[in-house]
């Protein structure tokens, strides 16, 4: 998720240890210094369906990679195929890769002109286009090839600053990825959340839960109204009911990876004691209205812009991978190495 809003946030998170539903504790707090370094470069990690590998991007608009967790062997997935730079890479339940990348290089504003592609797990055939534009992240079901995403409609002009996407009209869709004679395609596409909740000027889909009946997303307050709150919310797709899980006025809480059973989520959470760019730690949030939130991994130090971000939870719920980041980076969302930690209870 972009950090445009962080430039106006002054966070003072008051996070207390908590307990999830049915007396199950949320993950305990630990320092980033206890985490295992998987890679000295890269970011935007995604666990494979079997939990044995992690796909990631080496750098924004660079190549995509995959690391075997047991052996630490890294392979470049896209080196030998034409592309204009990979922004994100995720796994489908089948093991094929869902890739976010531009079709044309429109310069510094290419972030607002990305598309979805499929890369077969055999790495044969190169990137196969799905013919759909996307802005920011894509929610992918753990159960089937169901996805949700946001688009800018009408699209920004190439010369327009990509951050204008947050004050322009957007639409949200769900669809399935199917294969017709071996060729991937989008099917059963339909619009969802035609009208955003009053709290949100923009939303980024993150994950499905509750047997794919609910979409969990990050809600960005309206920039035009001067609301820089970032909240965690959910949408029950069939009824279009929206649920607020965590909203703290003027604070940064961006949902990322979700536990396999859907009971809690890892959230980028910030705090700072002076104006500027808030650095991020990782918190755990119980996914119910008024649910408990507690700090999970501390990756920040006073006076430093270094932080951690983009946490994802393994399919067995035992591990979390995340990236080293820097809130002062010129490339928003850039990763500077992958780490993994056991989820402590």
Image: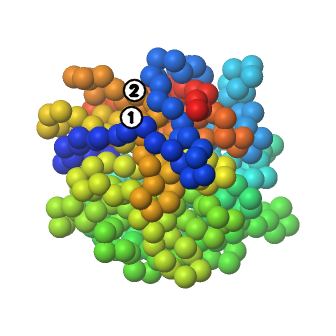
Vertical placement of 70 versus 11: above or below? above
Does the rendering let one see residue 3?
yes
Looking at the rendered structure, the secondary structure element under dot 2 is loop
Comes first in the chain, label 2 or label 1: 1
Measure the C-alpha gap from mark 2 to mark 1. Answer: 5 Å
Residue that badge 2 annotates: 299
What residue is disc 1 on? 281
Instruction: Estimate the x, y position of residue 94 in percent, counting from the top left.
Output: 79, 52
The number of numbered badges drawn on the structure is 2
Which residue sits at x=45%, y=22%?
A: 31
**Residues at badges 2 and 1 in contact (C-beta under 8 Å)?**
yes
Picture layout, residue 107 above or below residue 65: below
Q: Residue furthest front?
A: 23
| Badge 1 density bin: few <14, some 14–19, many ≥20, Cα 10 Å | many
> How far across and how far down the image is residue 205, in percent?
50, 61
User: Which residue is most to the right?
Assistant: 181
- Check disc 1 and report its element: helix, strand or loop: strand
In terms of depth relative to the viewer, which is nearer, 162 or 157? 162
How busy is the neighbourhood of tag 2: few (under 14 within 10 Å), some, or many (20 plus)? some
Q: Which residue is drawn at 38% across and 61% down?
A: 219
Where does the image place residue 160, in percent across and percent down from the top left? Answer: 28, 60
Q: Which residue is drawn at 33% across and 58% down?
A: 247
Q: Which of 112 and 103 is in front in this view?
A: 112
Quadrant of the image occupied by residue 148: bottom right
Q: Quadrant of residue 229?
A: bottom left
Look at the image and tell me in which quarter the C terminus lies.
top right
In the rendering, at what x and y percent does residue 96 appear? Answer: 74, 50
Q: Which residue lies furthest to the top in this view?
A: 33
The image's mark for residue 3 is none
């Amino acid at each position: 998720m972009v950090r445009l809003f962080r430039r106006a946030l002054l966070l003072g998170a008051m996070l207390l240890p908590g307990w999830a539903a049915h007396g199950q504790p949320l993950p305990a707090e630990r320092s980033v210094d206890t985490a295992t370094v998987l890679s000295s470069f890269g970011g935007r990690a995604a666990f494979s369906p079997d939990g044995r590998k992690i796909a990631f991007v080496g750098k924004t608009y660079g190549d995509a990679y995959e690391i075997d967790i047991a052996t630490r062997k890294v392979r470049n997935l896209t080196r030998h195929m034409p592309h204009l730079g990979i922004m994100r890479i995720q796994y489908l339940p089948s093991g094929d890769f869902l890739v976010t990348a531009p079709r044309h290089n429109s310069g510094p504003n290419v972030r607002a002109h990305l598309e979805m592609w499929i890369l077969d797990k055999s790495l044969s055939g190169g990137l196969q286009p799905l013919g759909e534009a996307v802005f920011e992240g894509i929610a992918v079901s753990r159960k089937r090839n169901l996805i949700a995403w946001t688009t800018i409609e009408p699209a920004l002009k190439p010369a327009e600053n990509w951050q204008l996407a947050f004050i322009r009209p957007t639409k949200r869709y769900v669809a399935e990825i199917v294969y017709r004679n071996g060729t991937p395609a989008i099917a059963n596409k339909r619009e969802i959340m035609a009208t955003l909740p009053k709290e949100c000027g923009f939303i980024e889909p993150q994950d499905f839960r509750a047997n794919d009946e609910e979409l969990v997303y990050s809600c960005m307050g309206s920039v035009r109204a001067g609301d820089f709150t970032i909240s965690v919310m959910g949408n029950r797709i069939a009824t279009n009911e929206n649920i607020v899980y965590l909203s703290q006025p003027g604070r940064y809480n961006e949902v990322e990876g979700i536990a396999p059973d859907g009971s809690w989520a890892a959230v980028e959470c910030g705090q700072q004691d002076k104006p500027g760019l808030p650095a991020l730690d990782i918190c755990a949030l119980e996914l119910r209205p008024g649910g408990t939130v507690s700090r999970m991994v501390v990756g920040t130090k006073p006076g430093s812009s270094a932080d951690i971000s983009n946490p994802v939870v393994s399919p067995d719920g035992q591990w979390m991978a995340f990236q080293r980041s820097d809130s002062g980076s010129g490339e928003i969302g850039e990763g500077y190495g992958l780490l993994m930690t056991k989820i402590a209870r």
